Structure formats: structure tokens, C-alpha cells
Image (tube, rainbow, N blue to C red):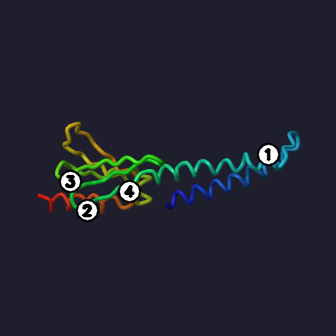
């Protein structure tokens, strides 16, 4: 949520600076009712990421990991804990500085594969929680 707030603050600051810059250009003379909507369109950038973030929800139960995604139509993907083979934490330098990262879940389903839980706050805690639930199931 911190990044969303920072994104909105930067978009508002950018909109104000763009409005001032467009009004200072004397050669073009863009009216305020045109420059203001153009500048406010910068708010669409953090709004997109905010919406994208809210379209995915991860839930750990005692028997599975549920991944819900979608805006209007929702899809739920279930990964049974008994099918999980490995849990890895991956974080770039930027993610490590800010205290978040990705939790990579390797599972032994029919199609196999890896599921990545993106941008999780304190990913080690959640990785350990998944591993603890897996151990308790066996």
C-alpha cells in the first residue's frame, strides 16, 4: 500500500508541475480547461497499478493455498499443500531494501510448474508459514 500512496503523491505532484509548465509556455497558450485534464491523466498510472494489485488475493488455509484473481469475473486457483515440493523466497535488491519479495512455490501437479506470489511483505515469514503448514500436514 505504501507504493500506491507514493505513486498517487508523485502523480499529483507531476500533474501540478505539468499544469504550471503548460501555462508558462507563452507560444502555445494552452487554456487551463485543456491543460488540467491532461495533467490529471497522470493519475491513471498509479490507479492502474492499484487496480492491478487489488485483482489478486492470496490465502493460506490449513490444506491449500488459494489464489483469487480477476476484477469482475473471479478465478480461484488452489494448490494443495501436499502437492508443494519447495518454497523459495526471491527478492531483488530494491525489494530487499523495502522489505518485500516474491514467494516461489514449486508444486507436483499434473501440469507441474511454479507459482509465484508476487510482492509479498516480509516474504520469509510467509515462506516459513507455508513450510510449517506443509510439515503439519505430513
Residue at numbered disc 1: 34
Cα distance, mark 4 to mark 3?
19 Å
Please give the residue where the numbered disc 4 appears in the rendered image: 120
Is 117 placed left or right of 136 in the picture?
right
The mark that comes first in sequence, 4 or 1, is 1
Q: Residue furthest left?
A: 138
Q: Residue 129: which numbered mark, if any?
A: 2
Q: Is residue 1 left or right of residue 65?
A: right
- First of labels 2, 4 by sequence position: 4
Q: Mark 3 and 2 residues: CB-CB less than 8 Å, in contact?
A: no
The front one of 107 and 9 is: 107
- Name the N-terminal-most of marks 4 and 3: 3
**Label 4 secondary element:** strand
Q: Earlier in the sequence, mark 3 or mark 2?
A: 3
Distance of label 4 from label 1 (alpha carbons): 40 Å
Q: Which mark is residue 81?
A: 3
Distance from disc 3 to disc 2, alpha carbons, whole Å, reads: 11 Å
Identify the residue at horizontal 39%, vertical 60% (top origin): 121
Q: CA distance from mark 2 to mark 1?
A: 52 Å
Q: Which callout, 4 or 3, points to the residue nearer the camera?
A: 3
Q: Residues within 10 Å of mark 1 (few under 14, many from 20)?
A: few
Camera-nearest label, 4 or 1: 1
| Front position in the image: 122 or 74 | 74
- Distance from Cα at disc 1 to Cα at disc 3: 55 Å
Which residue is nearer to you in this view: 2 or 52?
A: 52
Residue 17 x %, y %: 73, 53
Q: What residue appears at the point 84 percent right and 43 percent down from the top-left corner?
A: 30
Amino acid at each position: 500500500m505504501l507504493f500506491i500512496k507514493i505513486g498517487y503523491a508523485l502523480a499529483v505532484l507531476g500533474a501540478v508541475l505539468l499544469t504550471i509548465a503548460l501555462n508558462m509556455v507563452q507560444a502555445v497558450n494552452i487554456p487551463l480547461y485543456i491543460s488540467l485534464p491532461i495533467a490529471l491523466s497522470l493519475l491513471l498510472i498509479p490507479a492502474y497499478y492499484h487496480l492491478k494489485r487489488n485483482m489478486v488475493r492470496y490465502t493460506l488455509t490449513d490444506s491449500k493455498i488459494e489464489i483469487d484473481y480477476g476484477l469482475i469475473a473471479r478465478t480461484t486457483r488452489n494448490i494443495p499443500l501436499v502437492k508443494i515440493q519447495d518454497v523459495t523466497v526471491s527478492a531483488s535488491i530494491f525489494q530487499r531494501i523495502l522489505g518485500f519479495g516474491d514467494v516461489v512455490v514449486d508444486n507436483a501437479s499434473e501440469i507441474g510448474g511454479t507459482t509465484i506470489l508476487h510482492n509479498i511483505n516480509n516474504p520469509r515469514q510467509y515462506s516459513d508459514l507455508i513450510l510449517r503448514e506443509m510439515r503439519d500436514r505430513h
